[in-house]
Image: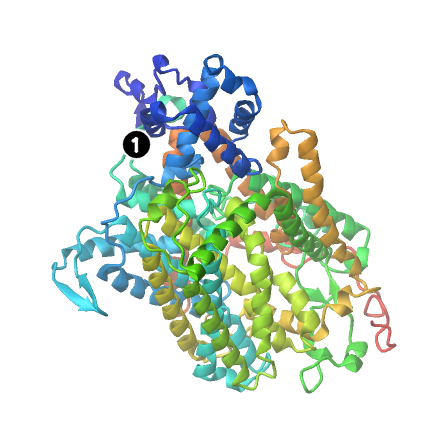
Amino acid sequence: MQSSPIAEDDKKLFDIAPAEDGLDNANVHELGMLEDDLAAVHARLGEASLEWTYAVIKEARVVHKNDPNFPGAVLDQMDRFLDDPNVLANPDKHADLIREMKMEAILSTENSPYQEVRANVDNTDDPTMPSLTFRVWVIGTIFSGIGSFIDTLFLVRQPAISVGPNVAQMLAYPVGKLMERLPEASFSLLGQTMSFNPGPFNKKEHMLITIMASVSFSYPYTAFLIPTQALPQFFGQEFAREFGYQLLSTMGINFVGYGLAGLFRRFLVFPSWALWPSSLATIALNKAFHTDQNEPVQGPFGWVFRRSRGQVFFITFGAMFIWFFFPGFIFQALSVFNWLSWIAPDNMALNNVMGFNNGVGLNPWPTFDSDFRTPWLTPLTIPTFSIVSQFIGICIGTLMTIAFYWQNAWNSSYLPINANNTFDNTGSAFNVSKILGPDGLFDNTRYQKYSQPWMSAGFCTYLIWYFAMYGATLSYICVYHRHEIVTAVRTTAKGFKKVILRRRADTTEDPLAEDVHYRLMKHYKEVPEWWYAILLIIAACVGMLGVGLWPTHTSPVVVIYGIIMPLIAILPCGIVQAVTGIAIPLQVLAQFIGGSFSGGSGVALMFFKSYGYISMYQALAFCNDLKLAHYIKIPPRHTFVGQVWATLVNTFVAASLFNFQMSFRGVCTPDADFKFTCPGQKTFYTGAVFWGVLGPSHLFGAGKRYNLLLLGFPIGVMIPIIHYFVRRSMPKREWIRQIHPVMICAGPANWGSPYNFSYFWPNVMVALFSFQYVRKRYTALWAKYNYVIAASFPAGIAVAALVIFFALELPAGGLSIDWWGNTVSYEGCEGSACTRFKIPEVGYFGPTPGTNAFT
C-alpha cells in the first residue's frame, strides 16, 4: 500500500478545524466527522436555527436512545441540551453545546448520523443517471444464470462450492466497461426505448447487476426438498422428478419471500436506523469502482496512505487469493490450527475442552485462515457491540456445555461433547428408518425395540439458547423498539388511507424521519404495496398447486400455515438483523411448531419449514438488497423489475438442474462421483423424520427427557427486561448500553454445536482491532479502507476456492497433498471424537429396549 511520511504540505489535510470557527477537535471526534463531513456541516451551520435544532434533536433522541450503533457520548450531549432549561434560556452561555447539537442535527437530516454510512454512501443523487439499461439486462441475466447454476449444482457437494455477489460485482465491472464500446443505437422493447450504449457504465447499473446476482447467487430451498423427496434412500417419491412439480414448488418458495420483503420495506428499509451493516461492504466496493475521490489519509507511524479504494481492493484481493491456497489446500492445519490438541491427541479431557473439530474449542489462537471458518459473518462490518455481546453468550454457553458433559446430564457423557447429530443408545447416529412403518409414519412398536433419541451436551446448550433467542427477540422489540414500530404503522396507515380515500399525501415533513436518502428516493415512483401483495398471493397459490396437484399426501393449506409464521416474525427478527447485522434463523422454531402439527408426516414438515423458515430468510435477504438500492438511489421500480427477473431466472435454472443433479452416479451416497454426497440434504431428511415423524412431543413434552430445555423461552424473555431495568438504574454506563440482550442469546445459538469457541474468537480479535483501535485512532484511514477490505477478503477466498476445486481437485486423478500439515488436525480425538464414558458392556445406555420404557 503506497504510503510516505507526512510532508509539510500534507499537514493541513489533517487539521480538523480552525480555532476561530469554534469547532474544536473534541466536538468533531465525538460526532465522528471527517474532513468532508466537517466542510458540509460548516456550510450549513449558519442556517440552523435554535428552534429547528431543538425539534430535530428531540426526535433524534427518541429514535436513537436505544440504538447501540449511535454514539453514546452524543446521546449524553442530547440529554444535556434537551433536559437543561438554561440552554434555551441562556444560549450564549451554552454556545459550545448548541453548536455541537446543530452539527448533529445537520448530519442527521443532510447526511447520516452514522459514520459507517457517511464513509460509504453518497448523500447526493443524479436522477438522470440511467439504471435499468440494456447492459443491466444482458449482464444481470447472464450472471444470474451462471450463479444459479454453480450454487445449485454444487450444493450437494462436500464441501459446497458457491460464488458471492461481491465476486459478481467485481467481474461485472470489466464487462460493463467493455460494453461501453457498443454503438449508441436505440431500439424499442415492450414499449420502452433502450440504447445499446446509454453512456459510461455507472454505479446504479453496477449495483443493480449486483442486486440481481445477490438474488440468484444462491440456491432455492427446493434444492433440499426435491432430492429428499425423489431419491430412494430418502422418501423415494418418484413424482418429485417431474419438471412441473419442481418448477411450481421452486417458484412458490422463491417468490413468497420477495412478496414479504416488499410489504415490510417501510419498516425495515426506509428508516435511517436500519443500517444493514453487512451491506456496507458491497456499497464500499461499488464506490471503489465509481469514485474519483482519492483523498490521502493519515495512518500509524506518521505515514500518509494515498492508494485509491479500487487499488486497495485489488491488492488485498490478490493477497487473499494467494494466501488462501495455503490454509485451503497446501497447509490445511493453518485453517484448523488446533495446536493444543497436537500435544496429546488421544487425551479425552484436553481435546473435549480445547479441540477445534470435536471439542468446545477453548483455543487462544485457533486459525490463520482469513475466512475464519465463518463465511456468513464478516468481522470488519459487524458492529463491535454485536460481536462482543455474542461472545459473552458464547462464553456462557461453553461453560454450560462443559458442566452438562462432566455432570453426565441426559447421559451426554456417553456421546461426543459437541456434536449436532442425534444418537441412539449405542452412541451411533440415530437411524430414523428404524422407527418408520411401511407407510412412512411413526411406528411405536419399532421405536420401542430400537432406541430413544439422545443429544450431545453441546446440542442441548444450542437448543436452550435457540429457544432463548426467540423469547428475547420478542421481548426486546417490545421493550426497546416500540417507537419504530408505531412510527412505521402510522406511516403505513396514512398510505392506505391515501389509496382508499383517494386523498392527497400528508405533506407535513418530519426533518429526521425523512433523512436525506429517503428524501432523494422520493424523487422516484415508489412500488405500491399492492404489487408486493399480489406477488405474495400468486406465489402462495403456485406453491399450493405444487402441493395439491401431486401425491404429496400433504394438504395445500400447509403453505398458508407456513406463511403465517414469517408474517408474524419478520418484523422483530428484521429489526434485530437491520441493527446488528446478525440474522435470527427460524429453523428450530419452524421444526418445533411444524412437527407439533404435521400429523406424523415428514413431508408435511418439509413444506412447513420451507415456507415458514426459508420464506423469512429470503425476505430479509431481499430487504438487504432493497437497502443497497436505497443507498445507491436506484429507482424502486427498476429494483423491483431486476429482482423479480433475477428470481425468475434462478427459479428456471434451478428447476432445470434437479434431475441432472440426481443423475450422477451414487448421488447422495458416500461413494458419489465428484463428492456429491449431499450432507445438507441428509440433514434435511433426518430433521424431517426426526421432528415431523417422531415429533417434538417425544422429546420436549411434559415429563419427557428434554422438557427442561424449553426453559430457554422464559429465560430469553426475561433477559431484555432485566437489561432494561439495569440500564435505567445506571443510565450513564455506556458499556451496559452496548450490551445487546438478543445477541447474548444469538451467540451460543448461531455458534453452538457443531461450531464452538474457536470459530468465533478470531472475529472478536479482528472486530476489536478494526472498530476499537483503527477507527478511534485513524478514523479517516478506517473510513476509506475498512469496508473495501471487508469486500476484498471474501471475494479473494471465493475465487481461490473455485480455482482449487476446478483446476486442482476436479480433474481426473485430482491433485491432493498428503503430508503432516494436512492430516495433523484430524488425528486422535480430533479425528474421531473421544467420549468421557464408554458404552456399558450390555451394549447400550439408558432404558432397556423392548420393555415399552420409551415414552
In the rendered picture of this protein, how many numbered marks are placed on residues?
1
Secondary structure beneath dot 1 equals: loop
Residue under the image location 52 percent in, 64 percent down: 615
Instruction: Decide: is 714 above or below 31.
Output: below
Looking at the rendered structure, the kind of residue marked 1 is Gln
Q: Quadrant of residue 661?
A: bottom left
Q: Quadrant of the C terminus?
A: bottom right
Q: Colour scheme of this structure image?
A: rainbow
- The location of residue 744, given as percent across then percent down, is 64, 44
- The location of residue 84, given as percent across then percent down, is 57, 21
Visible residue check, residue 183: yes
Q: Is residue 224 left or right of residue 391?
A: left
* Of the pair 492 and 573, the residue shown nearer to us: 492
- The location of residue 528, given as percent across then percent down, is 40, 60
Visible residue check, residue 318: no
Residue under the image location 73 percent in, 68 percent down: 696
> What residue is pinned by disc 1?
2
- The location of residue 541, given as percent across then percent down, is 49, 76
Instruction: Decide: is 688 above or below 760.
Output: below
* Of the pair 428 and 299, the residue shown nearer to us: 299
* Of the pair 513 and 694, the residue shown nearer to us: 513
Residue under the image location 68 percent in, 29 percent down: 730
Q: For mark 1, does the 10 Å Cα neighbourhood hold few (<14), some (14 to 19), or many (20 or more) residues? A: few
Q: Quadrant of residue 440?
A: bottom right
Instruction: Decide: is 296 above or below 197.
Output: above
Instruction: Decide: is 798 above or below 316.
Output: below
Q: Quadrant of the N terminus?
A: top left
